Image (spheres, grey):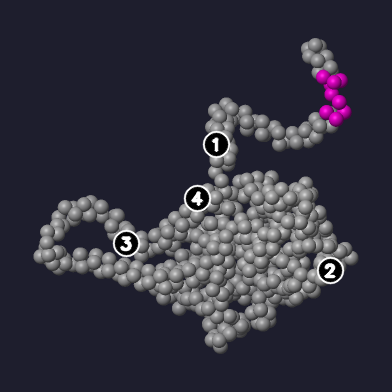
């Protein structure tokens, strides 16, 4: 019997598990293959929805489901924290002392927020990069009717690159709807010399932001936040005063990657950009945020990567040389207001050709918010074989 | 010919510097304009333009009629149906449904033949091996259903 172990049941882990289940149904039923997924958390979150929660554009119930409900019964779920990946002995050591052997391992451990990198970040700011964080921000925004809001990035890398732009534009739309936009000053602080990492998208988004009276501060690398005086200081010597700071914390790889000594300085796993194997290990794949690939950390990336990993893994199980490769495909919905948005599609070789913002992309986003559970996490359209 | 060229000259004289710049800008995009115009010509000739125009109006009207709640609601239904249909195409369910749907004529014949007239006819039907197999499937389904309804209720 071949043992496939998936570490983490976020977007990448869950959809890999469901895709493998559908593609290997007969082998799993016959006892030739066993799939185990290790995840200590009870909830699976639809993370792109966190952006919408602070403005009450989505409800809590739409954002989460129990991990167990998203997995077929034949997939073994171990609700325990993984402490270490022992690549030499091909096993995962759990916090309760158990050791889980694998023939193939899929690392989908995601990323976590690293508040400690920036002084004052934890106490002085809000963000929407977690379920509780997004609710906390929503409760503050309910009564925020006057003052300066700084939306920015406190350090790189961070997942979903358009998110701070989207939040700025959504806030703009929200306060215009309330008729009090003139009382709210929205500032955008970004570490790069343009508003978005990719020039083609930045060229489109920059004028939209300026037309909506968003005060843009580029080359703003956050050094520290002074919650007492409500000031954000940059390494470049600029200071931004705020009444409400929505700052995205820098991200870091998972503890288990760092503890296992298999990651780089940030805790990201060195990954082959085409095969998605952990470098030097044909029996280990890495998916989603956990990789060190120079592409967006986004759910869509995990979706496109999963297709490649499943195909390669099935080829390996059947004794064939895998041929499918990942081309760096990324898709990002970018909301440019309440009721309008655009979509960015790009890959390793082709930059995005953004379409002008409109209602259709916004509707697609609303539709996808619902379809995520069946189409992506549930892999409903993957053929059963 | 000469009157035509004088007309062009006249118009040229009337064009301002700003107009000339705009025309020059427009000419830079001629590579995009030419195929687009050809495409429009083809659409007009084939009569497809009218259909497309109507479709655009339909989308435009839908956009104004349908609100975001309706879009989300429709997507929710689609998601639930996708979820259910994806479970229906799993092999055990497929076998079960096919067992019934692949034999519709036989089904009709059996309906005509199989009559429950009272307790004794029911007993005699229970001796039939096919009915025993069918009942086993039904009871197995009831068992799974009962067990999982209990789990769902406990969760609440």
Which chain's residue wears label 2?
A
Q: Mark 4 vs mark 2: give the one in front.
A: 2
Q: In the image, what residue occupies the spot 62% across and 67% down?
A: A131
In the rendered image, residue A310, in percent from the top left (x then y), is placed at 54, 66
Q: Mark 1 vs mark 3: give the one in front.
A: 1
In the image shown, does A149 or A341 lie closer to the viewer? A149
The extreme right residue here reads A237
Which chain's residue wears label 1?
B
Please give the residue where the numbered disc 3 appears in the rendered image: B96
Q: In the image, what residue occupies the spot 47% across and 53% down?
A: B77
Asked which secondary structure carries label 2, the reply is loop
**Does the residue at mark 1 contact the one at mark 4 (Cβ under 8 Å)?**
no
In the image shown, does A12 or B141 lie closer to the viewer? B141
The extreme bottom residue here reads A97
CA gap between label 3 and label 2 equals 69 Å
Q: Earlier in the sequence, mark 1 or mark 4?
A: 1
Dot 4 surroundings within 10 Å: few (below 14), some, or many (20 or more)? some
In the rendered image, residue A290, in percent from the top left (x then y), is placed at 65, 71
Q: In the image, what residue occupies the spot 69% across and 60% down?
A: A143
Asked if badge 3 and badge 2 are on a common chain, one would say no
Q: Which mark is residue A229?
A: 2
Classify A366 as above or below A313.
Answer: above
CA gap between label 1 and label 3 equals 42 Å
């Amino acid at each position: 019997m071949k043992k496939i172990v998936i570490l983490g049941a976020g977007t990448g882990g869950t959809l890999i598990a469901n895709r493998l289940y559908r593609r290997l149904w007969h082998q799993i039923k016959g006892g030739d293959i066993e799939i185990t997924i290790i995840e200590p958390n009870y909830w699976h979150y639809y993370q792109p929805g966190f952006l919408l929660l602070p403005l009450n554009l989505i409800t809590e119930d739409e954002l989460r489901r129990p991990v167990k409900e998203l997995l077929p019964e034949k997939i073994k779920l171990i609700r325990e924290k993984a402490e270490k990946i022992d690549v030499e002995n091909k096993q995962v050591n759990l916090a309760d002392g158990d050791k889980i052997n694998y023939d193939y391992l899929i690392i989908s451990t995601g990323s976590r927020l690293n508040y400690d990198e920036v002084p004052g970040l934890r106490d002085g700011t809000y963000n929407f990069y977690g379920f509780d964080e997004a609710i906390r921000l929503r409760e503050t925004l309910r009564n925020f009717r006057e003052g300066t809001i700084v939306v920015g990035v406190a350090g790189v890398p961070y997942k979903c690159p358009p998110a701070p732009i989207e939040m700025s534009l959504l806030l703009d739309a929200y306060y215009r709807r309330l008729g009090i936009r003139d009382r709210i000053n929205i500032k955008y602080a970004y570490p790069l010399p343009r508003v978005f990492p990719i020039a083609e998208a930045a060229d489109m988004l920059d004028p939209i932001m300026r037309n909506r009276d968003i005060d843009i501060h580029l080359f703003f690398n956050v050094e520290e936040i002074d919650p007492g005086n409500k000031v954000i200081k940059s390494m470049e010597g600029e200071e931004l005063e705020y009444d409400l700071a929505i700052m995205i914390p820098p991200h870091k790889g998972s503890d288990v990657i760092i503890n296992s000594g298999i990651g780089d300085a940030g805790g990201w796993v060195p990954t082959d950009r085409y095969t998605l194997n952990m470098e030097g290990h044909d029996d280990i794949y890495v998916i989603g945020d956990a990789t060190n690939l120079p592409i967006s950390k986004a759910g869509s990336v995990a979706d496109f990567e999963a297709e490649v990993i499943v195909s390669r893994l099935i080829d390996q199980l059947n004794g064939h040389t895998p041929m499918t490769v990942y081309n760096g495909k990324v898709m990002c919905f970018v909301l440019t207001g309440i009721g309008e948005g655009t979509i960015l599609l790009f890959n390793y070789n082709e930059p995005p050709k953004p379409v002008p913002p409109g209602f259709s992309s916004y509707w697609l986003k609303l539709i996808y918010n619902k379809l995520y559970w069946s189409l992506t996490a549930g892999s409903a359209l993957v053929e059963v074989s | 010919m000469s009157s035509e060229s004088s007309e062009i000259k006249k118009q040229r004289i009337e064009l301002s510097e700003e107009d000339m710049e705009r025309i020059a800008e427009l000419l830079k995009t001629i590579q995009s304009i030419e195929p687009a115009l050809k495409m429009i010509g083809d659409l007009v000739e084939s009569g497809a333009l009218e259909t497309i125009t109507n479709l655009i109006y339909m989308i435009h009207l839908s956009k104004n009629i349908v609100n975001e709640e309706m879009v989300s609601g429709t997507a929710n239904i689609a998601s639930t149906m996708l979820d259910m249909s994806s479970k229906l195409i799993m092999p055990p369910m497929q076998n079960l449904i096919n067992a019934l749907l692949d034999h519709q004529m036989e089904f009709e014949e059996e309906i005509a033949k199989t009559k429950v007239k009272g307790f004794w006819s029911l007993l005699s039907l229970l001796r039939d091996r096919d009915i025993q197999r069918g009942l086993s499937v039904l009871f197995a389904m009831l068992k799974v259903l009962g067990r999982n309804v209990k789990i769902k209720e406990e969760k609440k």
